[in-house]
Image: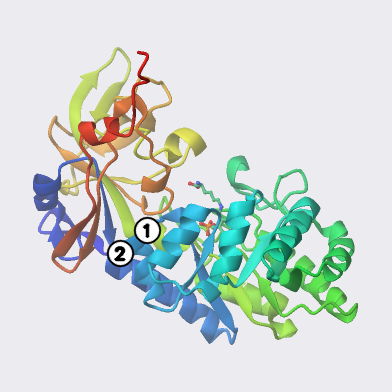
């Protein structure tokens, strides 16, 4: 059950009425439920444990890198999957022990490699021969040995949006599965590296189990072969990618996913690493906005909001669907009219929903975009010189502004005029 529900006709976050919240913090604003964040983690971890798997969960920080979000998971024992120096520093600052941090990503700089080595992370997921050689050199330069997993590109279609699919051979991610034996051989001879395992991640917002099943089978087979060939593989990183139901559709549950994992790699008997992002944070957050105008066009009606594509980019970038709920619950028999729900940014792509049936709305009414906890605030920009939306964490009837809306002066203060202007 979600912490976001109507009570007495008003949408609440846990025990907090959201109409009261926006009186205090304004709109647009992101709101996260701490109870839902932790419930999602417990359910994910519990399903893997119940399936008899030895699982370590490394939360994919990119989905929502807020320190309070990372800490909410770290408190429950989570590690972190990071892809940059910034994410690594955040994970450490939020209290994730270094030996529970996986460093992924196709392009790590020397400085990022060095920081990972100096802090003693669990492993680097390496995605190319070039990176393998560079990591070896950086590690030797520091007198260290880098723990490494090779990220396998299994050439499996994740059947998700083209912009978030990563496991096909034409994608930039991972090492072609046919090249893994040769690269393991190479890595085995490099003194700066210690091979620990294999990793796989085929994409995000995956809504069927078959692509996981196909990828995990291929990797399990490879893992067994490579171990028999004498490579000291100790664990397997299963990536992230399990989707959430943006439109209330019925999707495979974490229990179904855990069963696939057990069926495909359980027999290897090695510890498994998981990198879920969206599944842990997506539904635990929403974006609040207000209607500025209800504009009657010649053929369409527009709800012009004070939130825009710079706040929540997913609809513009991936044609993503987010449920829209008025803060004030509509009567069950209220008539619904199609609205184009748009922001004030000067681009036709600044549209959240086209022809969305919604109850009658008026200027000043507030609404919520559901499932905005993942890839929401973190993908925001200040385009059109719009201020970043604040982030609020709710626990019970209590809330904290965990990132305040900056002032225009604060944003401009990051810029300097050259002295010759
Ligand atoms: N591990 C790796 C190596 C990844 O590249 C990703 C996501 C994850 C784990 C976490 O995936 P998740 O469990 O969240 O699906 N901005 C897009 C999603 C991009 C995902 C990038 N990589 C969106 O808004 O849909």
Residue 219 image offset from top left, x and y in percent: 76, 68
The image position of residue 17, as x and y in percent, is 13, 57
Question: Looking at mark 2, is its residue's CB closer than 8 Å to ligand 1?
Answer: no
> At which x and y percent is residue 188?
84, 71
Tell me the quadrant of the picture where the N terminus can be found.
bottom left
Q: What residue is at 57 percent from the left and 67 percent from the top?
A: 118
Q: Measure the C-alpha gap from mark 1 to mark 2.
A: 8 Å
- Residue toward you, 107 or 264: 107
- Is 136 placed above or below 359 here? below
Find disc 1 in the rendering and name its residue.
Answer: 283
Q: Secondary structure at mark 2?
A: loop
Instruction: Pick whichever of labels 1 and 2 is earlier in the sequence.
Output: 2
Label 1: state its secondary structure.
helix
- Mark 1: C-beta under 8 Å from nearest atom of ligand 1: no
Q: Check disc 1: other Cα within 10 Å, few if <14, some if 14-19, many if 20+.
A: many
- Is residue 210 among what the camera can see? no
For disc 2, the marked residue is: 2
- Mark number displayed over residue 92: none
Judge by depth and name the residue closer to the eye, 308 or 77: 77
Q: Residue at x 38, y 36 (%)?
A: 381
Q: Is residue 126 left or right of residue 160?
A: right
Q: Is residue 148 above or below residue 318?
A: below
Display coloring: rainbow
Asked if residue 109 lies left or right of residue 25, the reply is: right
Q: Residues within 10 Å of mark 2 (few under 14, many from 20)?
A: few
Mark 1 or 2, closer to the camera = 1
Residue 186: give x, y in percent of width and height. Answer: 87, 64
- Viewport quadrant of the C terminus: top left
């Amino acid at each position: 059950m979600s912490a976001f529900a109507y009570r007495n006709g008003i949408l609440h976050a846990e025990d907090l009425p959201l109409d009261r919240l926006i009186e205090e913090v304004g709109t647009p604003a992101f709101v996260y439920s701490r109870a839902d964040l932790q419930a999602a983690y417990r359910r994910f971890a519990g399903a893997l444990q119940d399936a008899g798997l030895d699982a370590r969960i490394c939360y994919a920080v990119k989905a929502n890198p807020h320190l309070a979000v990372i800490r909410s998971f770290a408190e429950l024992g989570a590690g972190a999957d990071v892809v940059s120096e910034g994410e690594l520093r955040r994970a450490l600052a939020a209290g994730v022990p270094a030996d529970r941090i996986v460093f992924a990503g196709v392009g790590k700089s020397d400085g990022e490699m060095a920081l990972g080595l100096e802090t003693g992370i669990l492993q680097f997921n390496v995605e190319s021969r070039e990176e393998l050689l560079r990591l070896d050199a950086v590690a030797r330069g520091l007198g260290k040995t880098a723990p490494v997993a090779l990220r396998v590109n299994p050439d499996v279609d994740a059947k998700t949006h083209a912009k978030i699919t990563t496991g096909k051979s034409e994608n930039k991610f991972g090492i072609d599965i046919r090249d893994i034996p040769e690269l393991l051989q190479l890595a085995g001879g490099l003194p700066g590296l210690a091979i620990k395992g294999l990793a796989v991640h085929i994409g995000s917002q995956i809504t069927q189990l078959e692509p996981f099943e196909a990828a995990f089978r291929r990797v399990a087979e490879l893992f067994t072969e490579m171990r028999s060939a004498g490579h000291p593989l100790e664990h397997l990183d299963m990536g992230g990618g399990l989707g959430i139901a943006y439109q209330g559709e019925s999707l495979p549950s974490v229990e179904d996913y855990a069963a696939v994992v057990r069926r495909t790699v359980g027999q290897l008997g090695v510890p498994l690493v998981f990198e879920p992002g969206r599944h842990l944070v997506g539904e635990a957050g929403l974006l609040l906005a207000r209607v500025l105008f209800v504009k009657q066009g010649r053929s369409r009606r527009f709800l012009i909001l004070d939130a825009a594509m710079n706040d929540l980019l997913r609809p513009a970038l991936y044609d993503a669907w987010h449920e829209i709920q008025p803060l004030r619950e509509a009567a069950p028999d209220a008539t619904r009219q199609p609205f184009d729900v748009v922001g004030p940014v000067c681009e036709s792509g600044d549209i959240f929903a086209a022809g969305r049936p919604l109850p009658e709305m008026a200027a000043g009414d507030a609404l919520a975009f559901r499932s905005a906890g993942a890839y929401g605030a973190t993908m925001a920009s200040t385009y059109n010189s719009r201020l970043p939306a604040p982030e609020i964490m709710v626990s019970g009837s209590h809330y904290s502004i965990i990132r305040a809306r900056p002032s225009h002066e604060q944003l401009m203060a990051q810029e300097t005029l050259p002295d010759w202007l």
